[in-house]
Amino acid sequence: MANVIVIGAQWGDEGKGKITDLLSRSADVVVRYQGGVNAGHTVVVRDRTFKLHLIPSGILYPNTECIIGSGTVIDPQVLIEEIDRIEALGISSENLYISQTAHVTMPYHRLIDQASEEKRGKHKIGTTKRGIGPTYADKSERAGIRVIDLLDKEGLPDLMTRSVKAKNEVLEKLYGLEPLKAEDVIEQYFQYADRLRSHIVDSSLKIDDAVRSRKNILFEGAQGTLLDLDHGTYPYVTSSNPISGGACVGAGVGPTIIDRVIGVAKAYTTRVGEGPFPTELHDEIGTLLGDRGAEFGTTTGRRRRCGWFDAVIGRYAVRINGLDCLAITKLDVLDSLEEIKVCVAYDADGEKCNHLPNSTAQFAKCRPIYETLPGWKQSTEECRALEDLPKEALDYLKFLAELMEVPIAIVSLGASRDQTIIVEDPIHGPKRALLQPIANNS
Ligand code: IMP
């Protein structure tokens, strides 16, 4: 048995969907532990593309149980649409479970997210406008509505009437928007509850059953380390904890059951939304990375900002998440480049800085210090083993592993399942010492 956490080691969109899909093959249970429909993952199976927001990618395996955990926030309308979509493709949702204690995104959350972003003007965060921040804010405020409340036929009308009344004041007085009608919202959410009822469970008990039965559990993080509310590039972050520590809180398990933590990072860097991004490229290479990498948000369709790999961020992700190993994705996107740069440290006002600064203002001043490596200028898409890679591509991977001081267990060279090099089985292979880079093993 192995219980594994998979997290994003950058600003999200690292290709976790493909990696969790691959690892789900060895998992009996997949648990999504935070975030909501702000996340989006794309999984390509043969010629079919699956775009999922809330449902873990493990759903594509008929015997894998998928749990949307307590630390997530659930927009029932989007979740129902997603269930309908996968069922239309012939995939059963029978093994999908939703935590009773997850919080529910309401129509006023979406409206407030959109209106508050507009009000922030040039100080906007660049949210996905899916109501995620306001849903988590209500949770902290102890004013949220939980999935279990949707099943309470007697209590729900009063709870929702009070919530809608309170939020109508915000909508009308603060943002000049139309108020919502409580009866309409109640009616709509009762319908959602009827549709989702058979999936709703005590997720902590369900996960505990799996632990006791010594099943393999995969904890799937959404977004990425630098979007973490506590440890990301605040305030340009999401409102949950995508880091590995968030898995215990969001799933309701103790840290002693976790065996491994796998980080997923792109071979370059992307970011959506606002905030400093030291290695961002505004030139034709940035455009090339965006075009070749199809860097458009799964949820919002926004073009992602692109730049070189940032090892300062990589080392930070290793530290904050306690990474055992890395999966490097989209190496093939770099195939045509003459040379490739990697940020090894920052220059902050003339001082060399090896660590991510906590101050947003200081981070904004950081300029990347690059090392330049030769490109390989040939396709890697058909490579299926490290030995198939051009020497320069292998050297690039070794360089990243050395900089981050963790082994690389998986290399991804395209969207489909087979475009992958498994350097070492990250779940069942021997657990290696943290400081052993791939260079010592190849
Ligand atoms: P929110 O999560 O919608 O509140 O957005 C907060 C920040 O997180 C914004 O910069 C978003 O672009 C970013 N964000 C949220 N979800 C994702 C994701 O799945 N991938 C990348 N960025 C995301």
Image: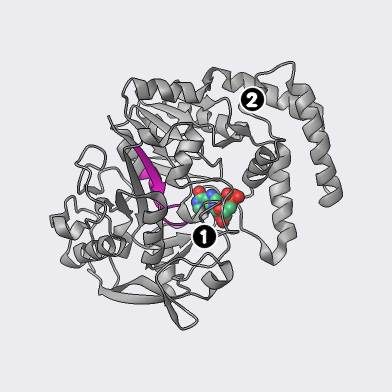
Distance from Cα at disc 2 to Cα at disc 1: 32 Å
Instruction: Give me the residue at 64% from left, 25% from top.
Output: 192
Q: Nearer the viewer, residue 259 or 180?
A: 259
| Quadrant in the picture for residue 35 | top right
Is 146 placed left or right of 41 in the picture? right
Give the SS element for disc 1: loop
Is 250 placed left or right of 138 in the picture? left
According to the picture, the residue beneath numbered tag 2 turns out to be 192
Task: Kindly give the residue lying farthest to the bottom in the view shown.
Answer: 350
| Residue type (three-letter) at the residue carrying disc 1 | Arg
For the residues carrying marks 2 and 1, which lies nearer the camera in this image?
Answer: 2
Measured as percent of width and height from the top left, residue 168 is found at 82, 40
- How many numbered circles are shown? 2
Residue 6 lies in the magenta stretch: yes
Residue 64 lies in the magenta stretch: no
- Point out the tag, 2 or 1, that comes first from the N-terminus: 2
Look at the image and tell me in which quarter the N terminus lies. Answer: top left
What label does residue 94 carry, if any?
Answer: none
Query: Magenta residues?
Result: 4-18
According to the picture, the residue beneath numbered tag 1 turns out to be 303
Is ligand 1 closer than 8 angstroms to the Cβ of mark 1?
no
Is 7 placed left or right of 274 in the picture? left
